């Protein structure tokens, strides 16, 4: 009953003309950049972050969140039609989506991914409504030591569960933590690593870092590799979208599994939509009665991952809003945005600021319904978008990055910083050093330092405090298990390679 | 310099950053475990980073690095630097137009009429949004 009153409160906040327009703007923009290869959700969210400073926190969050989940809907379009993922999590969708297009079944693929996305997203929103308040109640008793261990787990998971080398991921996390130290130390007022530059006194600008590592680096990489996407003329009619009876059978099971897998992984700290999509694909292939169809146009192969990535995106708001611990780099930027607005995500958020929390939850429902409409009857419009050539697009994105970064502090130094991080991100990514762990480390750095200091202050300098508290010990053990597993898998892989 | 050694630049850079952070950090007050000073984490994290980077340097085998095409990198860089320099001295439009035109040079075969139209429309739209609506303090022309 209480849940219903809360939801009513939420809808009261968002059923206004302004909120509906902002939500529509967010999800439309999200679909737009999701469809376009070469600009991702992270770049767009950082680009829009300065714009939201002019809105109140709830409206800002509705818009940024809308971009995030909207891009998951759009991301599959380019994967299916062009074999080029519009967003990182949609990379898996290429495997079976593009073969379906070649067989002339692009319409069906687009239809099942949209419906799957909607169901996965809705399932995770229900979980969010039911579990977030419960988790917040539990988390209210968490101590500084517990928080430190949770964040340590998030960072370890984000760096070791990725696709590349776990060691490189860990190095990037530590690098990010170190970058997070730049600026004024809150406890003593000491300037750290500012080297006499006044613009660094408040720390490195989050927007500059994110735009450099993702926006500029992504563009450089696309230009250098020369893999520019090109669309062959495809027409998607509503009639061509209707799935056959067989398709429905494949769809039902994979959609249910995708929802569960995605929600579960989304709730864990450190695992974002990309991992959810990859794991879901592996599961679908394993349980399928026709595993030989995978890679040649399997409906389950597109439904599972697409459902899972949407579920994980919505479920990721559970730890982000109730613990203040982001699951991936995009959530980290969103937390950064909330902090700038003066809202601290954490167990008190739901009780202190119920309008914000329930308002955002209500906007998720509205946004997902809008996306269903945007992506089914209007799919033809988005397909046309794919014919915008990249050579026109990238100078525009670069210009928007300059002006967007500048607008945060009216500082050209920040724009130069963006450029520097762009070159660094480009160069490091080419050598297999991932940027996402760096960004996550950067945002969590100050929080980790604060909790680490407080925990040791309370325990009078006794490091045993981290293993004496059961919650903290539990998280540390999982962290250790992850590290051991990462080391072992590397070892086993090396042995397998030698055996061959 | 050996071409293959170039592939080890990222871990080497991380090693230097780690050691640098520890060194600079040791100049701040370190404090004790109970009452940490501002230098504690810079030193600890710096050493952690240096250790991981050293491990990577030891494990990584030098690989061939294919030479990068310089044109896109140079044009994108020139565009951003031009924006930074011109925004401070010549105003919103010279900076924005210069950036769009310069970065367009990154790819061959641009249709210059199209590029010019896009540059002007984009700049006008951005001026309306950022300067007129959001009050960004950048004059259209001049300083």
Image (cartoon, coloured by chain):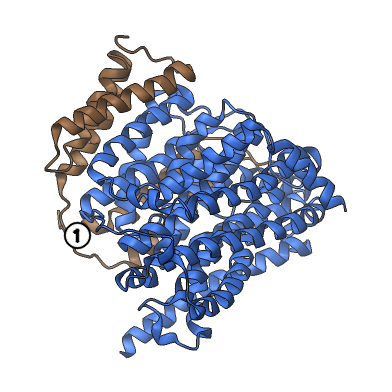
Chain colours: A blue, B brown
Position of residue A144 measured from the top left corner of the image (x, y, whole percent)? 73, 49
Of A295 and B88, which appears nearest the observer? Answer: A295
Q: Is residue A367 above or below residue A91?
A: above
Number of other residues with Cα within 10 Å of mark 1, as a class: few under 14, some 14 to 19, many 20 or more: some
Which residue is rendered at x = 25% and y = 24% of the image? B97
Kindly identify which chain the residue marked by label 1 belongs to.
B
Residue A79 percent coordinates (x, y):
37, 61
Residue at figure coordinates x 34%, y 60% from the top left: A432
Residue appearing at x 43%, y 22% in the figure: B130
Q: In the image, A206: left or right of A446?
A: left
Does residue B40 show up? no
**Is residue A478 something one can see in this rendering?**
yes
Q: Nearer the viewer, residue A5 or A318?
A: A5
Say above or below: A266 vs B21.
below
Residue B37: percent from left, percent from top = 62, 38
- Direction left: furthest residue: B109
- Image mark count: 1
Say what secondary structure mark 1 lies in: loop
Q: Residue furthest right?
A: A1
Could you tell me residue A287's position as x and y percent?
Answer: 53, 85
Viewer-proximal residue, A32 or A287? A32
**Residue of label 1:** B65
Residue beneath the point at 69% across and 37% down: A15
Question: Quarter of the image holding residue A55?
Answer: top right
Taking the image as shown, residue A214 lies to the left or right of residue A67, namely left
């Amino acid at each position: 009953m209480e849940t219903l009153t809360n939801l009513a409160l939420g809808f009261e906040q968002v059923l206004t003309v302004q909120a509906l327009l902002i939500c529509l703007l967010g999800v439309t923009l999200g679909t737009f950049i999701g469809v376009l290869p070469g600009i991702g959700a992270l770049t767009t969210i950082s680009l829009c972050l300065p714009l939201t400073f002019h809105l109140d926190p709830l409206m800002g969050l509705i818009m940024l969140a809308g971009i995030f989940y909207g891009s998951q809907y759009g991301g599959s379009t380019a994967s299916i039609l062009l074999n080029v993922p519009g967003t990182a999590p949609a990379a898996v969708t290429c495997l079976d989506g593009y073969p379906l297009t070649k067989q002339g079944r692009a319409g069906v693929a687009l239809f099942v991914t949209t419906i799957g996305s909607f169901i996965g997203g809705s399932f995770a929103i229900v979980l969010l409504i039911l579990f977030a308040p419960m988790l917040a109640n539990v988390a209210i008793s968490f101590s500084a030591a517990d928080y430190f261990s949770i964040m340590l787990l998030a960072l370890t998971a984000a760096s070791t569960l990725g696709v590349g080398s776990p060691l490189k991921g860990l190095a990037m996390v530590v690098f990010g933590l170190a970058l997070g130290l730049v600026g004024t130390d809150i406890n003593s007022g000491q300037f750290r690593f500012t080297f006499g530059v006044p613009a660094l006194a408040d720390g490195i600008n989050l927007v500059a870092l994110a735009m450099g590592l993702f926006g500029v680096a992504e563009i450089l990489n696309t230009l250098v590799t020369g893999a520019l996407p090109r669309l062959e003329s495809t027409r998607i009619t509503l009639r061509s979208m209707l799935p056959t009876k067989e398709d429905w059978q494949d769809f039902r099971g994979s959609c249910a599994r995708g929802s569960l897998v995605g929600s579960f992984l989304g709730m864990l700290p450190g695992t974002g939509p990309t991992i959810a999509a990859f794991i879901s694909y592996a599961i679908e292939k394993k349980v399928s009665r026709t595993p030989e169809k995978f890679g040649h146009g399997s409906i389950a192969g597109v439904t599972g991952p697409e459902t899972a990535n949407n579920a994980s995106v919505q479920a990721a708001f559970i730890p982000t809003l109730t613990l203040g611990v982001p699951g991936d780099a995009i959530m980290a930027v969103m937390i950064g945005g909330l902090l700038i607005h003066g809202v601290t995500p954490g167990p008190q958020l739901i009780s202190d600021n119920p309008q914000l929390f329930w308002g955002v939850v209500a906007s998720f429902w509205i946004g997902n319904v809008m996306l269903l409409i945007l992506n089914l009857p209007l799919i033809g419009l988005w397909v046309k978008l794919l014919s915008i050539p990249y050579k026109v697009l990238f100078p525009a994105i670069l210009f928007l990055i300059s002006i967007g970064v500048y607008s945060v502090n009216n500082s050209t130094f920040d724009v130069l910083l963006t450029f520097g991080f762009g070159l660094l991100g480009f160069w490091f990514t080419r050598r297999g050093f991932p940027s996402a762990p760096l960004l996550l480390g950067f945002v969590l750095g100050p929080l980790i330092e604060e909790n680490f200091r407080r925990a040791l202050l309370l325990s009078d300098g006794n490091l045993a405090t981290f293993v004496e508290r059961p919650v903290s010990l539990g998280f540390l053990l999982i962290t250790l298990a992850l590290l051991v597993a990462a080391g072992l898998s590397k070892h086993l892989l090396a042995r397998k390679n030698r055996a061959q | 310099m050996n071409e293959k050694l170039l592939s080890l630049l990222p871990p080497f850079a991380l090693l230097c950053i780690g050691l640098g952070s520890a060194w600079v950090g040791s100049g701040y007050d370190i404090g004790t475990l109970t009452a940490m000073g501002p230098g504690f984490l810079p030193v600890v994290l710096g050493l952690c980073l240096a250790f991981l980077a050293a491990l990577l340097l030891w494990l990584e085998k030098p690989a061939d690095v294919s030479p990068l095409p310089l044109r896109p990198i140079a044009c994108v860089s020139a565009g951003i630097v031009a924006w930074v320099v011109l925004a401070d001295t010549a105003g919103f439009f010279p900076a924005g137009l210069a950036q769009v035109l310069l970065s367009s040079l990154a790819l061959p075969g641009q249709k210059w009429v199209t590029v010019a139209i896009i540059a002007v429309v984009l700049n006008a739209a951005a001026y309306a949004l950022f300067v007129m609506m959001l009050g960004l303090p950048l004059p259209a022309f001049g300083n």
